[in-house]
């Protein structure tokens, strides 16, 4: 068993886990972060065609990307040549038509987006709004939304139907399916479980003032994570209130609530805990 039963099953079910290779059941859940860099650097990235110049700076015009079938080559189309309905991507409502034909699964990169590097993979029906900065390696799942000014700093794995919100910064982190951080948050070296939601202004701190590896406080003792940087791990269905903060090494079990304007103590908090000021 993982140390003190802090394995993946404590935070999300196997059916909710889209990347079992990152989360061996016999190891603690933060092993997923330790394996993230190697996993992303070993993937194939096919969204951006060879002709795309990732060093050209912000996109001068809106682009549509579309793949014919599951295995066809991805092509880029000028947004000015398409009719785009910018409804909610997370509900599968983003719609693109080209010459009257609906492009199933097409995604949209709005003018002003910056794509740094070629290791960027975008799923079907993704919307990236103006001013977002995407640095590879980075994978974003189907029907996710990257809002204006978002900063994805690399080694990020974003699942399906996720939201990375306005001026939200993410680095070395995992969003599981349906996780949402909609408004000016910081997510460093963290895992957001399925259907978790961060209130506006939430900060997941990842580095101790005194240095050294992050310790996980548990009722039966302290556990060394072996990681110099470790933010928060939120189980499925967790919610944080506006302007809340988590200390490095905060682990919230399934269904926990962190109330607004509250700082969560480091360590493990069991399922359905309500953390108050």
Image (cartoon, rainbow, N blue to C red):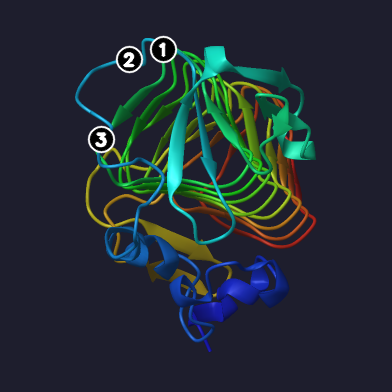
- Whether the residues at callouts 3 and 2 have beta carbons within 8 Å, the answer is no
Please say whether residue 154 is visible from this viewpoint.
yes
Q: Name which residue lies at 27% across and 59% down.
A: 41
Q: CA distance from mark 3 to mark 2?
A: 16 Å
Residue 136 is left or right of residue 160, and the answer is left
- Residue where numbered disc 1 is placed: 112
Q: Is residue 60 above or below residue 97?
A: above
- Residue where numbered disc 2 is placed: 58
Q: Earlier in the sequence, mark 3 or mark 2?
A: 3
Residue 247 horizontal/vertical position (percent)? 47, 41
- Residue 197 sits in which quadrant? top right
Which of the two marks, 3 or 2, is nearer to us in this view?
A: 3
Residue 3 horizontal/vertical position (percent)? 48, 80
Residue 126 got which mark?
none
**Front-lying residue, 257 or 142:** 142
Question: Which part of the image, by quadrant, shows the C terminus?
Answer: top right
Q: Secondary structure at mark 2?
A: loop
Q: Name which residue lies at 31% across and 49% down.
A: 229
**Front-lying residue, 255 or 45:** 45
Q: Name which residue lies at 22% across and 53% down.
A: 212
Dot 2 alpha-carbon crowd within 10 angstroms: few under 14, some 14 to 19, many 20 or more: some
- Whether the residues at callouts 1 and 2 have beta carbons within 8 Å, the answer is yes
- Residue where numbered disc 3 is placed: 51
């Amino acid at each position: 068993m993982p140390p003190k039963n802090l394995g993946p099953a404590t935070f999300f079910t196997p059916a909710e886990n889209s990347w079992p290779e990152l989360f061996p059941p016999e190891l603690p859940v933060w092993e997923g972060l330790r394996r993230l860099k190697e996993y992303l650097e070993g993937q194939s990235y096919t969204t951006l065609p060879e002709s795309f110049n990732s060093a050209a700076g912000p996109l001068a015009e809106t682009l549509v990307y579309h793949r014919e079938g599951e295995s066809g080559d991805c092509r880029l189309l000028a947004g000015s040549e398409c009719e785009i309905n910018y409804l909610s991507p997370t509900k599968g409502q983003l719609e693109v038509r080209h010459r009257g034909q609906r492009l199933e699964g097409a995604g949209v990169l709005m003018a002003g987006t910056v794509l740094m590097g070629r290791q960027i993979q975008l799923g079907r029906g993704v919307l990236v709004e103006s001013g977002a900065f995407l640095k590879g390696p980075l994978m974003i799942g189907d029907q996710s939304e990257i809002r204006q000014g978002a900063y994805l700093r690399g080694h990020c794995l974003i699942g399906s139907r996720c939201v990375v919100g306005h001026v939200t910064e993410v680095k070395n982190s995992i969003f599981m399916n349906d996780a949402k951080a909609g408004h000016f948050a910081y997510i460093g070296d963290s895992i957001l479980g399925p259907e978790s939601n961060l209130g506006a202004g939430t900060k997941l701190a990842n580095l101790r003032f005194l240095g050294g590896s992050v310790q996980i406080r548990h009722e039966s003792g302290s556990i060394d994570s072996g990681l110099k940087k470790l933010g928060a791990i939120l189980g499925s269905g967790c919610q944080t209130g506006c302007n809340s903060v988590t200390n490095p090494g905060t682990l919230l079990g399934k269904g926990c609530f962190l109330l607004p304007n509250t700082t969560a103590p480091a360590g493990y908090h069991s399922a359905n805990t309500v953390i108050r000021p």
